[in-house]
Image (cartoon, rainbow, N blue to C red):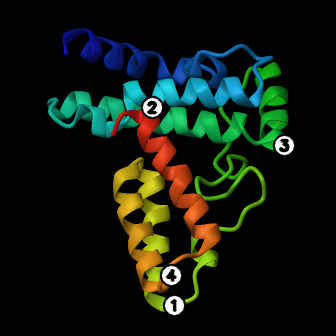
Amino acid sequence: MGAERHRVFDWDEVLDESNYYELLGVLEIADEGAIQAAFHEFARAFHPDAHLGAEESVRGAARRVFQRGAEAYRVLSDPAARQRYDFALSRGQLRLGAREVPAANASVTGRRALEELVESPAARQRARRAEELIDQGDLAGAMRELKMARHYEGGATPDLDERIDALDLALFASGD
């Protein structure tokens, strides 16, 4: 745990001086697959759930680093946001403004928000909660909420099932 603790604190210390590429450990010419693979590796190391047994200072640092890494992934995996980021980076700006960063629940392929994938009020409530949990980095909690949303919808919903599968993959990649 000592080496992991130091790694978390080391990244937390340089977080505001690091660009998105450095944070994920990819070159600026990295393709979508390389960025996704780098984020999965990053998530295994810094996801807050990977540090549940650590003291609060470590958990807080891991949370900050993970949130910035998730921001980096959202920007670098969205072609339009990445283009804006590359331009901003060329001018010395290490981060995009909050309005320029794609929301965690907005798909880079234009998919709808989770709430739009269900019809019943109870399922919509669960989908909204899942989006909040994803924003907080709680993928396991989001998975539980999405499964409840599917239950309230009365069974199979292809778009929701696709999102559940994607979340399951993210959980697997993060080791949860």
Among the two numbered marks 1 and 3 on one chain, the one whose residue lies closer to the N terminus: 3
Q: Which residue lies under the disc numbered 1?
A: 120
Residue 42: give x, y in percent of width and height. Answer: 48, 25
Residue 69: give x, y in percent of width and height. Answer: 53, 32
Q: Residue furthest front?
A: 156
Q: Which residue lies under the disc numbered 2?
A: 43
Among the two numbered marks 2 and 3 on one chain, the one whose residue lies closer to the N terminus: 2
Q: Tell me, for residue 124, which label it has, or none.
A: 4
> Where is the N terminus found, in terms of image quarters?
top left
Among the two numbered marks 2 and 4 on one chain, the one whose residue lies closer to the N terminus: 2
Q: What residue is at 54 percent from the left and 76 percent from the top?
A: 156
Within the image, what quadrant is residue 72 found in? Answer: top right
- The vertical placement of 35 against 63, above or below, is above
Between the residue at mark 2 and the residue at mark 4, the CA separation in whole angstroms equals: 27 Å
Which amino acid type is marked by label 2? Answer: Ala
Which amino acid type is marked by label 4? Answer: Arg
- The vertical placement of 63 against 100, above or below, is above
Q: Tell me, for residue 80, which label it has, or none.
A: 3
Give the SS element for disc 4.
helix
Between the residue at mark 2 and the residue at mark 1, the CA separation in whole angstroms equals: 33 Å
Which amino acid type is marked by label 3? Answer: Ala
Give the SS element for disc 1.
loop
Residue 49: give x, y in percent of width and height. Answer: 29, 40
Q: What residue is at 69 percent from the left and 52 percent from the top?
A: 99
